[in-house]
Amino acid sequence: MESVASVMDKLIIKLLIQKGDCPHCQKPLYAWKTKNRDGTDRCAPTCMSCGYSDLKRKEDVTTKRLYDQSLKSRALNLFQNGSIVPNESLFKKRMANYRVTDTETQLAKEVAMRYIKAILDGGVNHLILNGKSGAGKSHLSMAVCWEVIEQSNYDKKVAFVNYRELLEQLKFSFTDPEARKQIQGNLIKDLKTVDLVVLDDLGAELGGIQAKSATSYNNDVLYSLLEAREERALIINTNLAAREIVEAYGERVLSRIQNNSKGFTHTFRETKDKRTGSF
């Protein structure tokens, strides 16, 4: 009389096909030879020994893919729609198209690369880029943002804000309740809590007049943001020297800016204006 085991072996050969090995017990995984009418498999490959099904693995892979897509979407939406930039073309500035033209720009890039590593390692450092307009501070800062976002696999949340534009939007919101809810609520909350913030072009809001003429409202907004970012990653771009920052905003603002900035400061002194196309 034929044994049960022998009968089972014949059924397996007749009805099933091997689809790899079980990751748990290394025995064969089997699937139905016949398929559904639409050509799809009737079920996921299954181990006849331990009962493992490939379905769970596929579900896990699908779940991770959907999670990664969601994470990427949220990070990019916050960065591109939650930032305040005067020109959308700024988002095209990357490390790959940052032009190193002299020793000064090379050193700036090296500082930026060290800063990226520090932030990805969980640092709360402040990067200060100082110097005349057109030296490439905004470009380099935007490039840092993209590197942090992408190298963290979209886990890091980042915002880039032109400080003068921020003040203008805050002032506009005084007479518009919906704008006030959006800007003073969501935007300011994000600027105080995301992983990395760039405050770009600090000092430009002074309009070219003497630094000491900054308004008390300006100072209050700036200090509030800096206080919230004191132990969070921050990049400051400014054409003001330390002395001028003190004259414009006071000692406590300078102190907040310089906090956690050791080893992450760079001043552009000789770099030509990259926006003139002179080189």
Image (cartoon, rainbow, N blue to C red):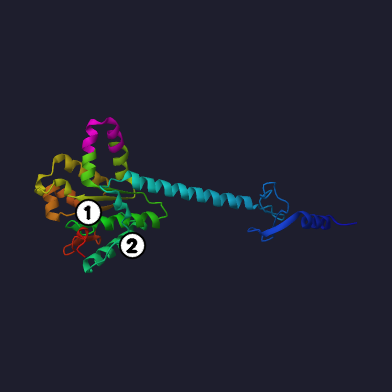
Write down the region rendered in magenta: 170-183
Question: In the visual, does 91 lie left or right of 206?
Answer: right
Q: Secondary structure at mark 1?
A: strand
Name above or below for residue 146 compared with residue 179: below
| Amino acid at circle 2 | Ala
Name above or below for residue 207 compared with residue 109: above
> How far from the left and from the top, in percent, is residue 105?
24, 65
Question: In the visual, does 217 lie left or right of 93?
Answer: left
> Total of numbered circles in the picture?
2
> How far from the left and from the top, in percent, is residue 77?
38, 45
Label placed on residue 96: 2
Q: In this orientation, does residue 260 appear?
A: no
The answer to if 181 sits in the magenta stretch is yes
Q: Residue at the bottom extreme?
A: 103
Badge 2 crowding class, 10 Å Cα cut-off, few under 14, some 14 to 19, many 20 or more, is: few
Q: Are marks 2 and 1 in contact (CB under 8 Å)?
A: no
**Circle 1 is placed at which residue position?**
237
Q: Secondary structure at mark 2?
A: helix
Question: In the visual, does 57 lie left or right of 204?
Answer: right
Name above or below for residue 44 compared with residue 218: below
The answer to if 122 sits in the magenta stretch is no
Q: In this orientation, does residue 60 appear?
A: yes
> How far from the left and from the top, in percent, is residue 34?
73, 51
